[in-house]
Image (spheres, rainbow, N blue to C red):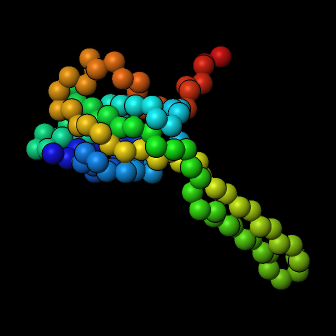
């Protein structure tokens, strides 16, 4: 069975045993997290999500992606150059279980990327 899940603004087609690099999650290595935004499970398509469906995963490690270098040079009369680099923080997870029903009753920590900002 496969599922399509949404996390970090991206969608992933997963099966049990897959290893994914997703946007940074608030979880330590070895913890089990649960993805609750499931767009499709097997033949069931959600509108927009499948109610009660969940995908459980184990966090392997917190890693950084390859460095992306941005070089900017102004043309003609301006002799300025600028180099900026960036390494995105990622979480390495292994998919352990796909639940078509009963995902809300498991009690597993939900996979969230960052804490919500309190409205002031």
Nearer to the camera, 25 or 75: 25
Q: Is residue 12 left or right of residue 87?
A: left
Q: Give percent across and percent down for residue 118.
A: 60, 19
16 sits left or right of 35 in the view: left
Residue at image location 20% in from the left, 47% down from the top: 2
The residue positioned 18% from the left and 41% from the top of the image is 41
Residue 3, given in percent of the width and then of the height, sits at 23, 44
Seen as rendered, the residue at the extreme front is: 30
Residue pushed farthest bottom?
76
Q: How many marks?
A: 0
Whether residue 100 is visible: yes
User: Residue placed at 65% from the left, 16% from the top?
Assistant: 120
Residue 108 occupies quadrant: top left
Depth order, front residue of 69/77? 69
Residue in view at x 17 percent, y 32 percent: 100
Percent across and percent down for residue 49 are 25, 34
On screen, 107 above or below 110? above
Place of residue 40 in the rendered image (x, y in percent of width and height, measured from the top left): 21, 42
User: In which quadrant is the N terminus drawn?
Assistant: top left
Compared across the picture, whether 63 is left or right of 48 comes to right
Residue 48 visible, this orientation: no
Q: Is residue 53 above or below residue 91?
A: above
Along the viewing direction, whichever of 71 and 93 lies nearer the viewer: 93
């Amino acid at each position: 069975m496969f599922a399509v899940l949404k996390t970090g603004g991206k969608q992933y087609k997963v099966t049990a045993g897959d290893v994914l690099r997703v946007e940074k999650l608030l979880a330590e290595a070895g913890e089990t997290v649960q993805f609750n935004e499931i767009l499709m499970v097997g033949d069931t398509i959600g509108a927009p999500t499948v109610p009660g469906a969940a995908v459980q995963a184990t966090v392997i490690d917190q890693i950084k992606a390859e460095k992306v270098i941005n070089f900017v040079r102004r043309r003609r009369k301006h002799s300025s150059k600028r180099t900026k680099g960036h390494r995105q923080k990622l979480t390495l997870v292994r998919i352990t279980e796909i639940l078509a029903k009963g995902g809300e009753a498991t009690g597993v920590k939900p996979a969230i990327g960052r804490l919500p900002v309190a409205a002031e």
